[in-house]
Amino acid sequence: MMAALSVTHGFLPPHPSPVGLIAALKADMGQTLMYGIVIAIPTVIISGLFFSKTLKGLNVELPKTFQSEGLSEDKLPSLSSSLFTALLPVILLAITTICTMTASKEWLSGGSLMANVIMFLSDSNIVMLISISIATYVLGLRRGMKMTQVMNIYADAIKDVGLIVLIMGGAGSLKEVLIVTGVSQEISTALNGLSFHPLMLGWLIACIIRVCVGSATVAGLTAAGIVAPLLAMHPEVNPNLMVLAVGAGSLMFSHVNDAGFWLFKEYYNLSIKQTIRSWSLMETIVAVCGIGGVMTLNLFLG
């Protein structure tokens, strides 16, 4: 489960970190999502299912603090409603991406009503607005909840994501400082002389920042500011794959300077050694499998 969550955090929009990378590297959200799913499936199988077989010696005892209270069946939404609302953003992005990839550029730019609707629905903000509106009705109002109750749930959720938004804002500001001051251009020029593929360079830069800083979001967005000029020097490189390469690198070896490390440790009541043996190694496998998938896709798309 943690492998799947980690892969989603680094690879799959509309999660905040990939969305930020897509904007910074001028990639396409729908195509990035499709490529990300292709890479995510084998990555989760290797880092989750296979790697977990080596962790049977760990004794996990969940603290009572993290155990939620059970609800009766009549208070729970149906499985179909839960899956539909959770997957709706992915479904909308997939449909609009397929439409834009199969349609001609002339038709999309022709200004027809259907073309405008597709372009409108492909916007990430609109996708999330539609999804949250439907979730409000399906999981809230239709089940007898009042709007004030739903708004209270949203207010609590905003408190939880507020720190994440603040971190992303700080990382984005640092990225802009690197770009405006010309530091990223200088770094890109120096890196351009290395005999590395640009996708590997993007991954490696994100890896180094991740290990030094800790936050995957900060590592990804900071690396994007450094890689963006390098990407401009290599127009043959697919920007969607660069998003995934940087996203994979931003997950490399989570350790004691990462909040996720401590969250995992406390939730499963593990020692630091056990957490490094399980969580840190899993994150490393995700990062390595991710760049392996990116380079494999590059062979077919290049």
Image (cartoon, helix red, strand yellow):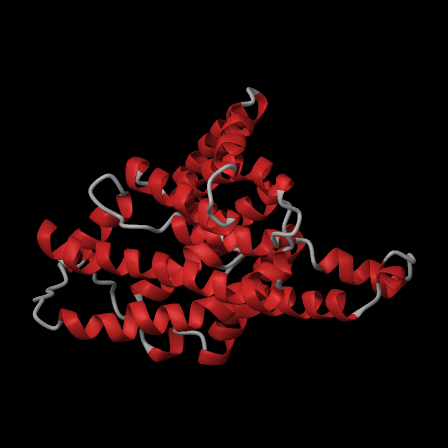
Residue 49 in the image: state x and y as whole percent. Answer: 28, 75
| 95 sits to left or right of 175 | right
Q: Is residue 29 above or below residue 51?
A: above
Rendered-image quadrant of the N terminus:
bottom left
- Which residue is located at x 40 percent, y 40 percent? 219
Choose top left, top right, bottom left or bottom right for residue 43: bottom left
At 26% across and 75% down in the image, what residue appears? 50
Residue closest to the eye, 230 or 44: 230
Q: Nearer the viewer, residue 73 or 64?
A: 64
Who is closer to the viewer here, 287 or 95? 287
Q: Is 2 or 174 nearer to us in this picture?
A: 174
Res. 138 visible in picture: no
Q: Quadrant of the C terminus?
A: bottom right
Residue furthest top in the image? 181
| Percent position of residue 167, x then y | 41, 36
Q: Is residue 249 visible?
A: yes
Identified at 63% across, 64% down, the residue is: 93
In the rendered image, residue 124, in percent from the top left (x then y), is placed at 63, 53
List x then y, in percent, for residue 160: 38, 45
Above or below: residue 189 compared with residue 73: above
Count of picture labels: 0
* In the rendered image, the vertical position of residue 71 relative to residue 255, given as above or below: below
- 103 to the left or right of 30: right
Which residue is found at the position 48% from the left and 74% from the top? 83
